[in-house]
Image: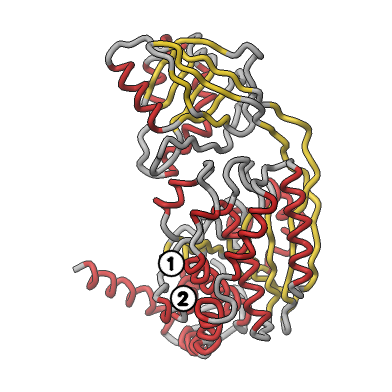
Amino acid sequence: MKFLLFMFVGVVHLLPLASGKAIYGNGPSQRTFQEIKEEIAHYGDVAKSIINLTVYGKAQNRSYERLALLVDTVGPRLSGSKNLERAIEIMQQNLKGDGLENVHLEPVKIPHWERGEESAVMLEPRIHKMAILGLGSSIGTPPEGITAEVLVVTSFDELQRRGPDAEGKIVVYNQPYTNYSAAVQYRMEGAVEAAKVGALASLIRSVASFSIYSPHTGIQEYQKGVPKIPTACITVEDAEMMSRMASRGNRIVVQLKMGAKSYPDADSFNTVAEITGSKYPEQVVLVSGHLDSWDVGQGAMDDGGGAFISWEALSLIKDLGLRPKRTLRLVLWTAEEQGGVGSSQYYQLHKANSSNYSLVMESDLGTFLPSGLKFTGSDKARVIMEEVMSLLQPINITQVLKAGDGTDINFWIQDGVPGASLLDDLYKYFSFHHSHGDTMTVMDPKQMNVAAAVWAVVSYVVADLEEMLPRS
């Protein structure tokens, strides 16, 4: 029944586009959807060539090997760190060595925060040293730390109900994990909400789909007019243990020490390379991932993989001697983890030309075996993207899903530019996300090959179509 319903909805969706009327409302084109569909079908052999080169041919495992070399050499790449700046220098050299065009760095100012030494020890009802990771932008504790009784809550609503009990205590959030979007608000806002009711510090259950006693860090935000208190993430296991203790009536006391400190904004760069368009060089299809990471693990998955399949997309196209009509632009963002700082400044610099951007693409949800492409754009653009994705039938990845937004491309999407992101196994992704476990061991070269093939086919075909993707 679901299949029949899907087919019916699909027919209704396509009828206006196949009616012989022009599908572009923002240009002089009088082409029908059928004509565009036939144009895309002609890219079948090109798509197979890209797939064969990266999945089965000489380029297989190249993105994985390139990534391993960088992260093994440099390690994690926190905003404002020397590791990040070294990685940017290496990538600029690599992109030039790969023969890409217009390789350059665009200066930006980015946050510089360091966690310092940190620890959390349960003193009552028993001695237990806990694994923690301070949250980005958190303040530190006094040198002697903060020693206080714990109040465990499972939600902001419970915190509000028990507000008088929180004063002078350390609030521990044991929020359930249903999905990342629902749980991450506790990491982002937990310190502020705890401070509003007089808490001295907050400890947040790691936002993770799976845990083997692994704390997961991430950015958090203070609010003007609300006292700043130290905040860190703890493991799922410790959050649940303290919740059980509290339910039994145990008095829980924790000593928290954090040496976290913020410094003046640092100089950094977005890293850019291109294949210049042959017919419409001023028009752009942008492919991207972010080069920075948190200061734990290697930043291989988040977002080394996304950055390197974006580089690989241009490498594959260049290796095949292809030059699309539009410019293919690779951008490796900086300071994404601090809220898209580098991409925000890029947007401010280039937004006057937003009408020349046909598609912005961001890979920042892992490069495991893709299940499809997430897309945000007009209905007319969506059916074109469905035809483009049909070219990936040889590797059975043809879905076009909703919500193609991403931290680094949302500025463009809000400006009306169609946006796309790669979707794969989010359960696996959020098992390692922002943790010590984000290393090359998580990565699979064969799955990266497939992800790179999807990225290259989509970016090339959209860049080479006679017309830009239509907007609303």
Tell me residue 231's x, y (percent).
Answer: 55, 25
Callout 1: SS: strand
For this view, does 208 lie left or right of residue 134?
Answer: left
What residue is rendered at 68% in x and 46% in y?
341
Residue tagged by mark 1?
372
Q: Is residue 89 above or below residue 251?
A: below
How does the figure colour the protein chain or chains?
A: secondary structure
Q: Is residue 180 above or below residue 346?
A: above
Is residue 41 among what the camera can see?
yes
Tell me residue 118's x, y (percent).
Answer: 60, 24
Q: Amino acid at mark 1?
A: Gly
What residue is rendered at 64% in x and 70% in y?
285
What residue is rendered at 66% in x and 73% in y?
314
Callout 2: SS: helix
Name the quadrant of the N terminus: bottom left
Q: Does the residue at mark 2 contact the one at mark 1 (Cβ under 8 Å)?
A: yes
Q: Quadrant of residue 68?
A: bottom right
| Residue furthest out toward the left | 1
Residue tagged by mark 2?
389
For this view, does 420 lie left or right of residue 103?
Answer: left
Name the quadrant of the C terminus: bottom right
